[in-house]
Image (cartoon, helix red, strand yellow):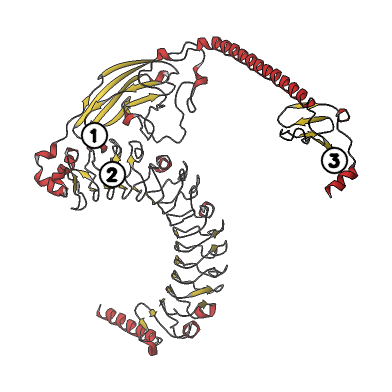
Amino acid sequence: MEYELLLVSLLVLFFGLTTTSGCIVERENSCTCDPTMRQVSCTRLGDSVDDVLPHLIPDETWQLVMKRVWVDDAVELRPHNFVTLKQLRWLDFSYNRISVIHPETFSDMRSLYFVNLSHNRLRLLESNAFNGNLPDLLSLDLSYNRLLLLTERNFKAVKNLKFLDLRNNPILFISGEAFWGLSQLERLKLSSANFTKFPAEPLSSLLNLRMLEMRDMPFIKSIPDHAFSFNSRLESLVLEKLPLSVGGLSVDVFYGLESLRHMTIASCNLTSVPCTSLSNVKHSLESLDLSRNSIQIIYPDDLSGLSDLKNLTLHDTHLQEIKPGSFIKLEKLEALDLSNNRLRTLYQDSFPENLTKLQEIRLTNNVWSCDCSLKWLTESHISLGHDHVTCTDPRSERGKSLKEMRKKLPDTFYKCKSPIITTKEYSEERYVEGDQALLYCDGSGEPLSFSWYFAGTVIPVRGSDLRKNGKELTIRNVQLNDAGEYTCIIRNAGGQKSITVLLHVDAAKHGDMSSNLPPGRGNDGSVKDSGKDCSTGTQNIRREFSRKPGFSSENSFDKTNIATTAILITILGCVTTLGVAGVFLFVGCVWSKRRDAAGQNSRNTQNSAPSVNVNGHCKHEQSKNASKKTMKSIELTDERVVFGGHGIYSKPIQDLDCPKIDRQSNINRKK
């Protein structure tokens, strides 16, 4: 054993001597050598790249780190700089001013597996910059450069590449075949790019991709359907600072992501949880981050399909309310971040009954109303993250931490009262098939929330689905299979009360009702899946607001009166048409008489001396005897005379009593 240790020591000593013999001794203040790791590290050298590479670097070097070596002048890397360094495995040339990498610069470096060229001045990659025999190159970092475009030949030779970092490059264009050949790539990072179209085609070449980050892309307004359909092995997806427009996440945008476990959609202008888009990953997603959006309300159907979710982050989303039942399906939830929002309360019935797996809820920087609605939190095992969870209301407890409330629990902490029902606890409604059914419940107490259930399943509530905070439920085009008991649950922090409404639906007597069904219903009245419903319930209900309280089936439209109504409308139309025609005829007669009278008055006027101009038009001028009387001018055409303001009088031009005028005398007079 001692002999073996001695032999190893001699080999290390010999290796160190042979390695250090090639170190840059005269520049030891700028370079260091590590014989055991075969590593050379330099910084702030005054020599040019051709003076240093490869002459001053030992041929046996495995790791070459040249950070901040050439920071004054632009640098170009050429093949002869590495002609003797064929054993290199790790190459770090970051924080320099490299602007050009010539073709085949790294050719035949068969052991090279890591290259860091970040924080340089690269604008364009030569098509063959990474050509050559590079079978072991696994990681390539080109972040923080100035790359403008990627072509189909940039990465064609590095077929075994696993990690590619392109962050903080103002890329304008990515060729559809830019990543062609990178069949083994597992991690890709893109940020600060300026292309206007989501690069779905280039991504389709990355069949083995496991992690994708896309951040800070100011011109990406939407992501199309099936954008990741070829990336079925993707496990982590980060979309951050993409200014998506309304509907920017299409329904099937995440189609095909069967292995996705972690997703971030942060700072993307979302105004609600994209539940329809998330339905394609509901069986695999374990972590979801929707931070820094503008999601003010969480509804029960928003996250109900994500049964495997373990971590949910809703940090800084302007969140004001979490509806009861919103997290009730998240039985595997372990951590929840609700910090930096505007929440006042958090109901226990928003969560599943079994909370053994939920370990932490971050509640800092909200406007908590410390009353009995938070009592369950003070008595649970759940960690609240930090001690800075403070009360805003009531005033007597303002500024106190929830941790203090756990210890003190004053009587004022339990001030909430159970809601009081103000409508009948049990009622019946009857409608005819095809009508719109209105169900109603109400109660008093603060604050209140309303939820409707049918056949034991919550009816999805979203935005405009219900009126008056959920008190009114309208079923459009009610069908026979909509009949049954509907339960309205009225909740607040003090408890809950229920109201039952029994709905009867009578079969229609006339005609086939299937023609009147709304889009999405079949002939049997069932609802077809349109892919846009976030609900996971078994009973789908059409809801509208066109009915007012008190509207019943007796007031519905009677189809037997259609023929009578049509006849009445026809008669009324005919009478209206005749009346309009009579009015037009009367107006025409009056106008014709006024026209004839105006023409007769004009012919009787003899006080003007008409003159004919060169173009053959006759104008009346005032005579000396009628100097105080203003005459309106007339214009003579080939067939008629038009009197200004006196109607129209037709007469052949040769019949007008216009005196003959000597044209020459007229000219002399003008002179």
Mark closer to the chain start, 3 or 2: 2
104 over 207 or under it: above or below? below
Residue 33 or 653: which is nearer the viewer?
Answer: 653
Point 35% across, 86% down: residue: 29
Q: Nearer the viewer, mark 1 or mark 3?
A: 3
Point 24% across, 31% down: residue: 491
Question: Which residue carries the number 3 mark?
Answer: 615
Residue 319 or 159: which is nearer the viewer?
Answer: 319
Secondary structure type for disc 3? loop
Secondary structure type for disc 1? loop
Point 85% across, 40% down: residue: 615
Residue 601 horizontal/vertical position (percent): 76, 24
Secondary structure type for disc 2? loop
Question: Which residue carries the number 2 mark?
Answer: 333
Residue 267 horizontal/vertical position (percent): 39, 52
The 10 Å Cα crowd at callout 1, few under 14, some 14 to 19, many 20 or more, is some
Residue 227 horizontal/vertical position (percent): 49, 48
Q: Which mark is residue 447?
A: 1
User: Residue 567 lies in what quarter of the image?
Assistant: top right
Residue 125 visible (yes or no): yes
Q: Amino acid at mark 2?
A: Leu
Mark closer to the chain start, 1 or 3: 1
Residue 380 horizontal/vertical position (percent): 17, 43
User: Residue 124 lies in what quarter of the image?
Assistant: bottom right
Q: Which mark is residue 496?
A: none
Disc 3 from disc 2: Cα separation:
97 Å
Disc 1 from disc 2: Cα separation:
27 Å
List the single residue furthest toward the bottom.
26
